[in-house]
Image (cartoon, rainbow, N blue to C red):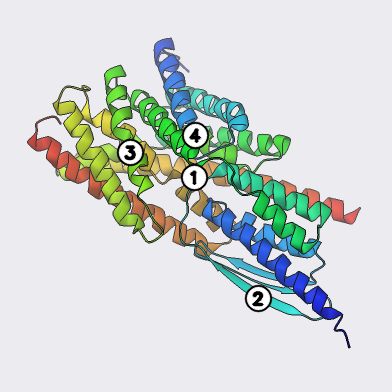
């Protein structure tokens, strides 16, 4: 006898898997917990789930979906690394809206998710990050009181941060990496001033700090905390504070170094 | 109320450098380039508001709070108009408020064992961070309450 429910079960499995893939990618791009949980719930409900329990933290998402025939399925996703990518959040948001409206076949849903993956060439993305760093660091150096030469110096020095990010891997310790970036940016700023590129070492360093500061993490952690996601909010806040401490360690060494060279 | 603090040169420097930095942030955080004009408009509005409120009130906490209220309101409204997550407009709008300078001077004072400077700069860093956070929280909570109310009203229909 053909088991009619097996088709439904297969669909529920694929649907939950694809919904969690979207959720995991949202978290990796730096979305809020509420948005992530909401996305999984909306998609599963659109596919007729009678029960959806989803719990997301910054490192793990787990969801159980119950279908009307009593079939239950649980899947989890582990999140290792996050890098702000607001365009991707926007794309995934649009995709999940589209999926909730049209409710495509689960296999088609999976295909849509795969098709929506970034098609921008990696070289262009890297170039964008480098140009972005240049503008950000230069702009902030002037914003915080530096002159044009300081801005030029900071913009060049600041390029070491996206360059170091290129060697960052999944297994790289995030705190150690931030210390390395801060140390490199700090020491290079001091060296740049000592060879006459720029007049104010403090302004140059402030410009480069702005590239490392965990502003998005602090903002997200507060949003999470206030919307009742205490665990994730605290995790993000601790991560942001650790990053801030790592920045302080790196730049403190650079400041001592600057003292030796008499540029501060 | 006196406008003695006002200097067109200062304001122009803040606006131009702030916009340049925000454009850099848009590229670094990989924000859709089509959304950049709105994001930059939010940043310009925030810098203007921050400049005048700091000059008029001379209070670090309040001026940052007011600026972040304006930034969040703008981001939440534009997010609904353009059907985009609010964070896409919020992050670039508040990035110019982030106390990078004060954080640096706090660290420098710590290294130099200058307790007075450490206390003053440390307190101001916390004041700015709290101001931004409270502003974001007040407005986003209000908006989520309004949206929940709207959803509830729609479900009753």
Disc 2/disc 3 C-alpha distance (Å): 42 Å
Residue B58 in percent (x, y) is at: 41, 27
Foreground mark, 2 or 3, reads 2
Q: Is residue A176 left or right of residue B79?
A: left
Q: Give whichever of discs 2 and 3 has the lower sequence position.
A: 2
Residue A160 in percent (x, y) is at: 30, 38
Exactly how many numbered labels are in the figure? Answer: 4
Examine the rendering and report whether any part of residue A230 can be seen.
Answer: yes
Disc 4/disc 3 C-alpha distance (Å): 17 Å
Disc 2/disc 4 C-alpha distance (Å): 38 Å
Callout 4: chain: B
What residue is disc 2 on? Answer: A74
Depth check: A223 or A64 in front? A64
Q: Is residue A99 above or below residue B41?
A: below
What residue is disc 4 on? Answer: B27
What residue is disc 1 on? Answer: B133
Callout 1: chain: B
What residue is disc 3 on? Answer: A209
């Amino acid at each position: 006898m053909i088991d009619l429910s097996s088709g439904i079960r297969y669909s529920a499995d694929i649907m939950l898997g694809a919904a969690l893939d979207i959720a995991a990618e949202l978290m990796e791009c730096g979305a809020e917990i509420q948005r992530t949980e909401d996305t999984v719930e909306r998609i599963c409900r659109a596919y007729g789930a009678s029960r959806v329990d989803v719990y997301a933290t910054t490192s793990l998402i787990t969801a159980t979906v119950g279908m009307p025939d009593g079939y239950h399925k649980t899947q989890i996703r582990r999140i290792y690394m996050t890098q702000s990518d607001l365009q991707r959040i926007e794309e995934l948001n649009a995709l999940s809206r589209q999926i909730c409206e049209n409710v495509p076949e689960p296999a088609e849903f999976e295909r849509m998710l795969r098709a929506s993956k970034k098609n921008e060439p990696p070289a262009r993305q890297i170039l964008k990050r480098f140009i972005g760093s240049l503008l950000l660091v230069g702009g902030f150096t002037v914003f915080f009181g530096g002159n044009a030469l300081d801005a030029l110096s900071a913009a060049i020095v600041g390029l070491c941060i996206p360059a170091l990010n290129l060697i960052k891997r999944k297994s790289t310790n995030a705190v150690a990496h931030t210390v390395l970036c801060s140390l490199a940016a700090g020491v290079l700023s001091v060296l740049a001033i000592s060879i006459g590129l720029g007049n104010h070492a403090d302004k140059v360093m402030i410009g480069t700090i702005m590239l490392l500061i965990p502003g998005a993490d602090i903002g997200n952690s507060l949003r999470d905390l206030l919307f009742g996601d205490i665990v994730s909010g605290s995790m993000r806040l601790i991560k942001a504070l650790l990053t801030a401490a790592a920045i302080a360690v790196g730049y403190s060494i650079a400041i001592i170094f600057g003292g030796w060279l008499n540029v501060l | 109320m006196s406008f003695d603090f006002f200097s067109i040169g200062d304001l122009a420097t803040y606006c131009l450098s702030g916009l340049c930095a925000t454009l850099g942030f848009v590229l670094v955080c990989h924000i859709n380039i089509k959304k950049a004009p709105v994001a930059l408009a939010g940043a310009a509005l925030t810098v203007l508001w921050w400049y005048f409120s700091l000059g008029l009130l001379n209070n670090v906490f309040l001026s940052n709070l007011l600026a972040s209220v304006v930034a969040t309101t703008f981001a939440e409204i534009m997010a609904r108009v353009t059907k985009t997550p609010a964070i896409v407009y919020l992050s670039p709008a508040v990035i110019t408020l982030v106390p990078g300078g004060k954080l640096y001077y706090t660290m420098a004072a710590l290294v130099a064992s200058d307790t007075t400077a450490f206390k003053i700069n440390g307190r101001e860093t916390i004041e700015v961070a709290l101001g931004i956070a409270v502003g974001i929280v007040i407005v986003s909570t209000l908006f989520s309450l309004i949206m929940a109310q709207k959803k509830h009203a729609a479900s009753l229909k």
